[in-house]
Image: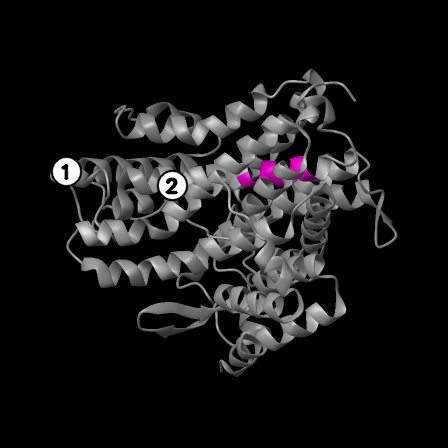
């Protein structure tokens, strides 16, 4: 039944090598990441002590091999930056947590290797290949096209229920099919591990598409008007029935438009600082976040109940951390437990919560620093009067979806290497921009 999944995964590395012979290296990297994540099966081979061989590790290994074979000089030209330190800390946070905790250095190193494949390598590839505004435009166009390619599969599953993964690969990737039901209809999963992952990806692609079409960074996509394509992508993103992702999509577009119109960075700073403030208030600040539950109740009772359950788990996790709050336990220790006097079973949900319990406040700071610091550095180098400029708009859209991903990780744990690649890209793109661009002088 899984023969097609085996063929797809085992054949992906040779396919990446072939892509590098057909496209320029930068576009080959973008195509390989997007195609691999969007269409390879949610499946993998577990191997002791090393990351599973799945769609992400196959893509990372394939691109690194192709870079060595076809573009080796680029690897040796790479120069690290202080901005890369949070990602380095996040990759090796499990080693620190496990060495200080109860599982030991071997388990820590094994988990750190998995972090390197899941987070470090995509970030490094973004640093290596997306190095200027033209590279950011190539990435933005890749995201725009990938979202448009996903429109028909999403519409099919919205109408017929999530069936494509089963039809192509012979099995459904998620354990609970009932979770695909939403709002009296279906939430598509296509070839990703959850409908929430598809929802965020489509909303991110819509933000990129709408902004670059509005700013005339591109006027057409395969001969069709870019604005019309962006409108279709926006509509399908809404139909994916991911409330949180839809809210982030609207906030992302509003942040870009208000910042460019008022020529102010403050709208972006507000969104960037939101996850930092949320985590600080929910941990050392002792905030119970009842206001968020009431706000979610305006959308629906179902959304309010879901958010209450997540917030209660967060509170219980923090109360159970005790003296391990700085470096964590090295793994999610509390899953399925219940704090005395609480009605909520602790469940690992938001990525920040998983990072907190596994790697402590150190890990959370490293994780969010690796996503937000590149955006901060980039935004500081570009005055808001340029945000809607056709040459700059694609990079601003990419920076915005990285922040959307960071905020989404407060409530979900839906890893996507494309966003991590984009975070790494922001560091290299920022370094290519002259300091004179900080002012409003053109």
- For label 2, the SS is helix
Furthest-top residue in this view: 262
- Label 2 and label 1: CA atoms lie apart by 19 Å
Residues marked 2 and 1 touching at CB (< 8 Å): no
Q: Main secondary structure of the magenta part?
A: helix
Q: Which mark identifies residue 413?
A: none
- Number of the front mark, 2 or 1: 2
| Position of residue 428 measured from the top left corner of the image (x, y, whole percent) | 60, 43
Relative to 265, does residue 150 appear above or below in the rendering? Answer: below
Residue at 37% x, 45% y is 89
- Reading the image, the residue beneath label 2 is 366
Decide which of tag 2 and tag 1 comes sooner along the chain. 1
> Dot 2: within a 10 Å radius of its alpha carbon, few (fewer than 14), some, or many (20 or more) residues?
many
Q: Which residues are magenta?
A: 395-402
Residue 293 on the magenta segment: no
Q: Which mark identifies residue 323?
A: 1
Relative to 243, does residue 279 appear above or below in the rendering? Answer: above
| Position of residue 329 measured from the top left corner of the image (x, y, whole percent) | 21, 49
- Determine if residue 102 is in view: yes
Residue at 62% x, 36% y is 430
Q: Nearer the viewer, residue 333 or 56?
A: 56
């Amino acid at each position: 039944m899984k023969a097609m999944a085996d063929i797809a995964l085992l054949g992906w590395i040779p396919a990446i090598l072939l892509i590098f012979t057909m496209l320029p290296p930068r576009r080959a990297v973008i195509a390989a990441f997007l195609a691999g994540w969007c269409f390879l099966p949610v499946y993998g081979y577990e191997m002791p002590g090393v990351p599973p061989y799945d769609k992400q590790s196959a893509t990372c290994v394939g691109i690194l091999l192709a870079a060595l074979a076809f573009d080796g000089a680029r690897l040796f030209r790479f120069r690290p930056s202080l901005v890369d330190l949070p990602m380095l800390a996040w990759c090796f946070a499990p080693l620190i947590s496990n060495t200080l905790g109860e599982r030991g250095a071997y388990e820590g190193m094994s988990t750190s290797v998995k972090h390197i494949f899941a987070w470090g390598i995509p970030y490094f590839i973004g640093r290596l290949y997306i190095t200027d505004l033209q590279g950011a435009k190539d990435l933005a166009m890749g995201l725009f096209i990938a979202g448009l390619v996903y429109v028909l599969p999403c519409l099919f599953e919205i109408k017929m229920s999530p069936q494509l993964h089963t039809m192509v690969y012979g099995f459904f990737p998620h354990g609970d099919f009932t979770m695909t039901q939403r709002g009296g209809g279906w939430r598509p999963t296509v070839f990703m591990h959850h409908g929430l992952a598809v929802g965020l990806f489509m909303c991110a692609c819509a933000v990129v598409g709408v902004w670059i079409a509005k700013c005339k960074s591109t006027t057409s996509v395969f001969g069709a008007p870019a604005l019309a394509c962006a409108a279709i992508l926006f509509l399908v993103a809404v139909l994916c029935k991911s409330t949180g992702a839809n809210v982030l999509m609207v906030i992302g577009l509003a942040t870009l438009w208000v910042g460019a119109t008022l020529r102010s960075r403050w709208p972006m700073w507000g969104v960037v600082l939101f996850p930092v403030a949320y985590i600080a208030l929910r941990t050392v600040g002792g905030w119970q976040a009842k206001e968020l539950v009431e706000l979610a109740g305006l959308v629906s009772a179902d959304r309010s109940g879901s958010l209450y359950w997540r917030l209660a788990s967060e509170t219980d996790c923090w109360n159970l951390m005790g003296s391990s709050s700085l470096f964590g336990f090295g793994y999610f220790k509390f899953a399925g437990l219940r704090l005395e006097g609480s009605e909520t079973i602790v469940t690992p949900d938001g990525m920040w919560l998983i990072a907190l319990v596994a790697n402590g406040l150190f890990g959370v700071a490293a994780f969010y620093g690796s996503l937000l610091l590149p955006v901060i550095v980039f935004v500081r180098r570009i005055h808001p009067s340029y945000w809607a400029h056709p040459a700059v708009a694609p990079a601003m859209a990419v920076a915005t979806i990285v922040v959307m991903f960071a905020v989404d990780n407060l409530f979900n744990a839906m890893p996507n290497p494309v966003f991590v690649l984009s975070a790494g890209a922001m560091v290299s793109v920022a370094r290519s921009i002259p300091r004179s661009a900080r002012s409003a002088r053109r």
